[in-house]
Image (cartoon, rainbow, N blue to C red):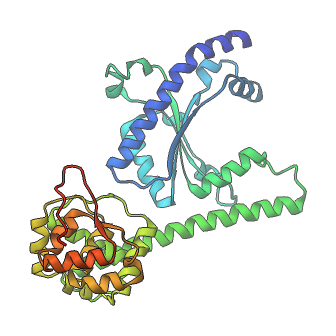
Amino acid sequence: MNEDQFKSWYQEHQPSHESLKTAAIKILEDLLKRHKIDYFSVTGRVKSVDGVIDKVYRRGIKDPEREIQDFCGIRVITFIEKDVKPVAELVRKCFRIHPEKSADKSIELGTDRMGYRSIHFICDLGKRRLRLPEFVQYKNLVFEVQIRTVLQHAWAEIEHDRGYKSSEGLPSDLKRRLNLIAGLLEIADRELDTLARKIDRYSLSVSRRTDRGNLNVEINSITLTQYLDLKVKELGWPLFPAKTTAEEKDLLVIEAQAFGIKTIKDLDELVTDEFLKACKKRGGPRISYIGLLRLILMFTDIEKFFKLAWGRRWSNMHPMTYKVLIQKYEPRKLNEWLKNLGIGLLVVIGTRRPRLQS
C-alpha cells in the first residue's frame, strides 16, 4: 500500500475510530464512577492523517493497517499512584487485552533511570460487548489505553511537547537538570501516594473508633464528614452533592469551630432526640454535609448561629429548614427574627411556602 492508498484508506476509516473513541471514553467513565475510583480525567484522541504518515516514516512501518495499534488512544489520568492499579485491573476485566502489544513503562524504565512512566494497553471492546448491535461496528478495531498519574502526565508532556525524550543532544548541565526534575517529580508522586495511604488509614481508624462509640476525637475535615455521613444515612436523606469539595470540607471545620465545637463528641451532644424527631417531620429532601451541620447549629441556638460572621451572609432560607426550626422555636418569634435579619424563604417549585407572620 503506497502513501496515497494509505491516506485514502485511513480517511475512510477515521470516522469509525472517532466513534470508537467516544464509546470507549463513555464506557470507562461509567466504570470508574460505578467502582468509585477517583480520577482526574478520561480523554481520547484519534491520530490525524499527517500524524500517522509521520509515524510510518519515522518507524519504517511497512503495513500501517496491521502494525499501527493506536489509531485511537484513550488516556486515564489519576490523581495518585495508588489509583493506577485499580484502573488497570478495571481495564483488564472489562476489555479484551492484547498482552503482546501492551506495556508497563515503569518496568521498562529500569531501576537506574528516571522519566516517563505509564501503563499502556492495546485492547478491543471484548467478545461479549462486540455482540451487541451498538458495538458490532467496532469488531475489527483496537484502541490504546494509557494510565498515568497527573505528575507522570506532566513529565510525559514535557518530554513529548518540548522534544526532550532523548536528552543526549543537550549540554551536560541541562541534561543533569532535566534528570533532576524527572527525579523530583517521581519522588513527589510517591510522597503523594504515601500521604494518601496514611490519610486513608487515619480515616479508617477514626471510623472504627466512632463505631465503638468513642467520639472523643478532634474535629477535622475527615472526622466531620464521617460523622455527618452517618447522620445523613440515619435520617435516610439523599446526600447532595455526592462528593464534597476541599473548600466545603474546610468550611465545615471553620463553622463548627466558630460555634465552639472541638470534638465529635461535642457535636454529637447537639444532635438530640428532639432534633432528630424534628428532622423526620421535615421529610427527605437532598442535603449536603454543610447543610446538615448548619441545621444542627441553628436548631441548637439560632441567635448564636446568626451572630457569627458567616451567618450574616444569608439572604434566604429553604422552606424545609424552616419546617425543622418551627418544631423548636415559636413561629412568631422565629419569623420576627428572620425578618430583622432580612432573611426570606426560598421559593422551591413543588414546595408550599410557609407564611411569615407579621
Image location (x, y in percent) of residue 189: 58, 64
Residue 264 visible in the displayed image: no
**Residue 36 or residue 246, whichever sits in front:** 246
Quarter of the picture containing the N terminus is top right
Query: Which residue corresponds to the image point at 68% horizontal and 14% vertical from the top-left?
Result: 7
**Can you say whether 138 is above or below 289 in the image?**
above
Furthest toward the right, the residue is 171
Query: Which residue corresponds to the image point at 34% horizontal and 27% vertical from the top-left?
Result: 129
Q: Quadrant of residue 338?
A: bottom left
Query: Which residue corresponds to the image point at 60% horizontal and 18% vertical from the top-left?
Result: 65
Image location (x, y in percent) of residue 36: 35, 54
**Residue 243 or residue 27, whichever sits in front:** 243
Quarter of the picture containing the C terminus is bottom left
Q: Quadrant of residue 207?
A: bottom left
**Residue 335 or residue 290, whichever sits in front:** 335
Image location (x, y in percent) of residue 78: 50, 54
**Can you say whether 269 is above or below 136 in the image?**
below
| Position of residue 285 in the picture relative to residue 183 (left or right) | left
Image location (x, y in percent) of residue 60: 75, 25
| Position of residue 308 in the picture relative to residue 274 (left or right) | right
